[in-house]
């Protein structure tokens, strides 16, 4: 199992599954990160938090904790 946190800069990955539950999962889905969507990893901050991604043609920053809940391939 690979998470979004483990993906490298410049890589394009596809969402397989969202972990987490309740409000946290709902917030991730509200940002447009749903099963089957492709995500491009643009940048990672020097200390690894946050991660800047492009999803559905817009840019988004995610915390490491949120990125760990997103399973990708």
Image (cartoon, grey):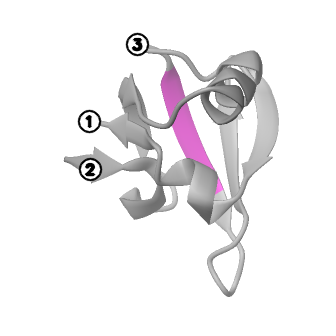
Label 2 to label 1: alpha-carbon separation = 7 Å
Instruction: Label 2: state its secondary structure.
Output: strand
**Relative to 56, residue 55 above or below:** below
Image location of residue 65, percent across then percent down: 59, 60
Answer whether residue 68 is magenta in the image: no
**What residue would you read off at disc 1?**
73
Sort mark 1 into few (<14), some (14-19) or many (20+) by Cα contacts within 10 Å: some
Residue ID for mark 3: 36
Which residue is painted at 61% across and 50% down in the image?
Answer: 66
Answer with left or right where residue 52 lies relative to residue 67: right
User: Considering only order in the chain, which callout, 1 or 2, is on the residue closer to the N terminus?
Assistant: 2
Residue numbers of the magenta segment: 38-42
Mark 2 and mark 1 residues within 8 Å of each other at the beta carbon: yes
- Quadrant placement of the C terminus: top left
At 55% from the left edge and 39% from the top edge, which residue is drawn?
A: 40
Residue 4, percent across and down? 45, 49
Q: Residue at x 76, y 18 (%)?
A: 30
Magenta stretch secondary structure, dominant: strand
Q: CA distance from mark 3 to mark 2?
A: 15 Å
Q: Secondary structure at mark 1?
A: loop
Kindly give the residue lying farthest to the front in the view shown: 22
9 and 37: which is toward the camera: 37
The 10 Å Cα crowd at callout 2, few under 14, some 14 to 19, many 20 or more, is: few
Quadrant of the rendered image containing residue 64: bottom right
Per the rendering, the mark at residue 2 is: 2
């Amino acid at each position: 199992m690979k998470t979004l946190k483990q993906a490298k800069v410049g890589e394009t990955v596809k969402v397989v599954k969202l972990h987490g539950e309740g409000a946290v999962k709902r917030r991730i889905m509200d940002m447009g990160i749903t099963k089957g969507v492709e995500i491009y990893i643009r940048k990672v901050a020097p200390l690894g938090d946050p991660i800047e991604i492009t999803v559905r043609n817009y840019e988004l920053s995610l915390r490491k904790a949120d990125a760990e809940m997103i399973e990708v391939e």
